[in-house]
Image: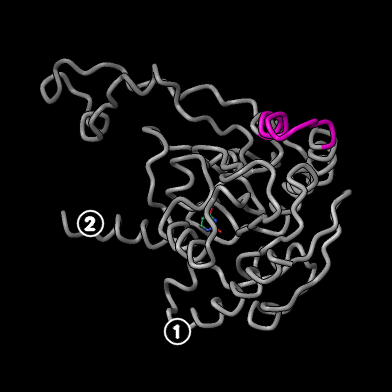
Amino acid sequence: MVAELVAVLDWYRAMGVDEATGDVPIDWLQRGDGAPGKGFERPSPAALSTPPEPAVARAAPTAAVHPTSRPAPAIPAPRQFPATAPDAAVMAARTAARQAADLDELGARLAAFDGCSLKATAKNLCFYRGTPQASLMLIGEAPGREEDLEGKPFVGRAGQLLDRMLAAIGLSERDAHITNIVYWRPPGNRTPAPQEAQVCRPFLERQIELVAPTLIVLLGGAAAKHLFGVADGIMRIRGKWRELEIGGNKARALATLHPAYLLRTPAAKRLAWRDLLMIKTALGD
Ligand code: URA
C-alpha cells in the first residue's frame, strides 16, 4: 500500500505536480467554457488554519471510528477570475501597460492583472530583479519554482549561474535589469504557451521602454523566438546581433543559451562564453 502511494506521488512529481497549493481538491472540469483559472480559489488563511479531516474519517464518518469528527471544511467560494477571451486579455494588457508611468506603476498594474491564466496556479508575481534603468536588459523564459516562491526572476540554480556568467565579464545585477517573457510560473515548469507570452507582451514592451536598454540579451530559445518572431532553434539564432525596436526603444539584441541548458550541457558553455564576450565588447562600444 505504502509503495503504491509512493509510486503515485512519484508519478505526480514526474508530471510536474510538485507543489501542494491547497487542502481541498479543485475540479477543473467544472469550469465549463470559462477561461483557464476561472473559478480558481486558493483557500483563505482562515480555511487553512482548520486542519483538514483525515481522509479515512471522511470515508467512514461513524462515531465509533472518529468520535470528535467535525464537518469537512467548506470548499471556498471561487475567486472571481474573469473569463477573458484571449484577444480581450491582450487588449486589457495593452491598456493597463500603456498607462504605467514608471516601473513601480507597471508592477502594480501587473499585480492587478487577471488576464494571464498562469497567475491562477502561481504563488507570486515575478516582475524583475536588478537595476530599474540599465543599459543591459536580460530576458529569460519563465519563472521556475524558486522564482515563484521568492517573487523574483532568476534566483534559483539557473539564476546563480547567470550571476556567475555576468561576473565573468565584470558585471552584476547592479548593472542589469533581469526579467522573463512571462511573469508567473507555468505549472510544472513547462515552456509558456504562445498565448501566455502574448498576453504578457504589452507589459514586457512597456517594461523595455521604461528600462530603456541599449543592449538586450535573450536567454534561451523561447525568449529569442518570441521577441525575434522567428521559428529557428536557439543554436541557429544565438551569437548574432540584431536590431530590436520595441515601443519607443531601439536596442541591439543578442540571443544566447539559457543558463538552465548550460547546467544540463556544460560542453555548451564555450558557446555561451563567446556570446558573453560579444556582450562585453558591445557594452564597451
Ligand atoms: N529560468 C528562466 O527562464 N527564468 C527564470 O526566472 C528562472 C529560470
Which residue is depicted at the point 31% across and 17% down? 71
- Residue 259 percent location from the top left of the image: 50, 67
Residue density around tag 1, few if under 14, some if 14–19, many if 20 or more, within 10 Å: few
Which residue is depicted at the point 62% across and 45% down? 183
- Residue 157 percent location from the top left of the image: 41, 59
| Front: mark 2 or 1 | 1
Give the number of the disc on residue 6: 2
Q: Is residue 239 above or below residue 48?
A: below
- Element type at mark 1: helix
Residue density around tag 2, few if under 14, some if 14–19, many if 20 or more, within 10 Å: few
Count of numbered tags: 2
Which residue is depicted at the point 40% across and 20% down? 45
Secondary structure, magenta segment, majority class: helix
Instruction: Give the residue number, with chain letter if any, for mark 1.
Output: 267
Which of the two residues, 14 or 106, is positioned nearer the viewer here? 106
Question: Horizontally, is 269 left or right of 251 in the view?
Answer: left
Looking at marks 2 and 1 on the same chain, the residue that comes earlier in the sequence is marked by 2
Span shown in magenta: 98-110
- Residue 181 percent location from the top left of the image: 67, 54
- Residue 62 percent location from the top left of the image: 18, 23
The amino acid marked with disc number 1 is Ala
Which residue is depicted at the point 60% across and 59% down? 141
Q: Is residue 166 above or below residue 276?
A: above
Give the number of the disc on residue 185: none
Assess whether residue 105 is covered by the magenta stretch. Answer: yes
Residue found at the far front of this picture = 284
Q: Quadrant of residue 88?
A: top right
Which of the two residues, 254 or 111, is positioned nearer the viewer here? 254
